[in-house]
Image (cartoon, rainbow, N blue to C red):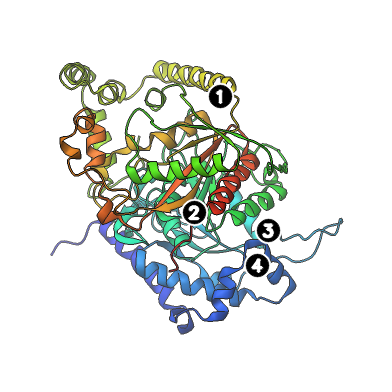
Amino acid sequence: MFSPSYHRRDCAIKQEERQRKLDELPPSYFEACTDADDKVLDLPLSELVQCHSAGSLSTASILLAYGRKVVSAQKATNCLAGVMIQEALAQKIPTGTDHKGQRLTPLSGIPVSIKDCIDIEGYDTTLGYSSKVNHPASSSAAIVRLLHDAGAITHVKTTTPPGLIGLETSSDLFGRTSNPYNDKYVSGASTGGGGALLACRGSVIEIATDMGGSARMPAHFCGVYGMKSSVGRFPSWGALPPMPGLESIAVTCSPMSRRLDDLEQFWKRVVEMKPWDYDHTCVPLPWRPIDLQGKKLKFGVIWEDGIISPSPACRRALELVCDALENQGHEVLDFSPPSIAEGAGVFAPARKDEKFDPVILGIKSLMALPLWLKKFMAIVTRKWTGDEVWASMLETLHVKSPAEERSLVVSRDEYRAKWHSAWDADELDFVLTVPHPLPAIPAGTAEKVTLVSCGSMMIFNILDYVAGVLPVSFVDRQSDALPKDFMDSAEYKNMGMISKGAYSVYDAEAMHGLPVGVQVVGRRFEEEKVLQGMKIVEDALKVCGHKFIPREF
């Protein structure tokens, strides 16, 4: 009998370790939440810190409430990469005040989950790869050290797809993470584990990363909040990127949360901890309070990204936001930025029998084709289908020479300048877009939807703009259905190959009840302003009777 491959062996080892950590929890963790637990779970971040600091809530009681949700979330969605609850119970939280009398632990007692691409000393950082099993990190990432000094509780690590790139969080190492609202649908990627856990109330904050929407897509798909920072604003040293050494589009650590107020409080408290003392790549930029309440603001709306038109459900969410803002006296106008399709125009150590997201396999196969063949395919595509987006992809997806890489950076900077001018010309405060043209997609359909569908998120990584996603509504089987004759319509026939692939998975009847969000965008280093913009949007929706109420899990 042949022995199993190293890949399969290490997958089994990691899954057994995760299950053992769960089984070692006290029996009380496998019971349903009590009324007392629900009161703990309902506490906003600021109140939870206050109760824990005052001693009216112990670490054990907080972890019991959140631990029960962790256990049920894992059972429902398979969102965990690692369990550290027992270690968290023994964690010594600093106490006391500084010379000014301010508390030294501004995140005291806050459960924070960590995406499995961020180093925690003594634990594996797998990025979904079996080759990284049994290679524990020798030191913790900057954000983890800051969190521990601030009194936060790092209780679990969450799942990612292999290499952090894709539309679905699924790997041989941990299996598939499903959407809490419907297990036949994905939770997004690459922070799909964190998005699912938050929706299930298993954490207060998730530390995600984002290079092309990895924090925002799961927020959109799972009905939670996420905000991508500008490079250098949030501590990211010690978070492993999907493509090490890529400086043209950097990865940022970006927090996600269940509540917008919690997200803002977390951001404020992290920045007040002076993250530049923990991470040499952080800009020493203090927190800058901003108050936009009562001011008339100007929102530019991008309805189309030039690649895939928003589905009826996602368009309706964006329309709800625009109508609510106008009702509050804000100015909302159509914004026509430089081409998103133009702007959006390497793998980690994998083993030979390791499965990848079909999106990654497709890109890898396309890059392997000779350039002359791809250029010929592009000519044929333009002539016979008129699909400019796909033709451009064929021409540009190849391994670049150093000179071509430098040329792309020059083009990126020129593109950023065009956006800056367009934003200034319309005198915008914020830009609004759909985060993704679809709600959560069915499991196993990523190859049809393709990574190109993420253009409305990726573009703000290229620009290094701040972008936040908040939940707005749910898919409605009646309001969001496509016309019965849609596939025979001129609109569908005029779509390119990429759009047709995406629309082939859209089904409002089957997607009924899935969350949909909207993206609020500001410019570089405007984290405080974007959080306020998200709050203005949420308050406007509430006044208009469209408050988002998540399902309780």
Considering the numbered disc 1 on the image, is that residue within a helix, a strand or a loop?
helix
In this figure, which residue is indicated by the disc labeled 2? 546
Separation of marks 1 and 4 at Cα, in angstroms: 40 Å
Identify which amino acid the numbered label 2 is placed on.
Answer: His
Of pointers 4 and 2, the one earlier in the residue sequence: 4
Q: Are marks 4 and 3 in contact (CB under 8 Å)?
A: no
The quarter in which the C terminus is drawn is: bottom left
Q: Residue at x 31, y 22 (%)?
A: 396
Separation of marks 3 and 2 at Cα, in angstroms: 39 Å
Q: Nearer the viewer, mark 4 or mark 2?
A: 2
Of pointers 4 and 3, the one earlier in the residue sequence: 4
Identify which amino acid the numbered label 3 is placed on.
Answer: Asp
Considering the numbered disc 2 on the image, is that residue within a helix, a strand or a loop?
loop
Identify which amino acid the numbered label 1 is placed on.
Answer: Trp
Is disc 2 surrounded by few (<14), some (14 to 19) or many (20+) residues within 10 Å?
Answer: some
In this figure, which residue is indicated by the disc labeled 1? 423
Against 213, is 103 above or below? below
Image coords of residue 541 (percent x, y): 53, 50
Q: Are marks 1 and 4 in contact (CB under 8 Å)?
A: no
State the residue lying farthest toward the bottom: 27
Separation of marks 4 and 3 at Cα, in angstroms: 17 Å
Q: Residue at x 41, y 57 (%)?
A: 193
Image coords of residue 97 (percent x, y): 81, 62
In this figure, which residue is indicated by the disc labeled 4? 48
Image coords of residue 34 (percent x, y): 51, 81
Of pointers 1 and 4, the one earlier in the residue sequence: 4
Q: Nearer the viewer, mark 1 or mark 3?
A: 1
Q: Is residue 364 visible?
A: no
> In this image, 382 relative to 18: left or right?
left
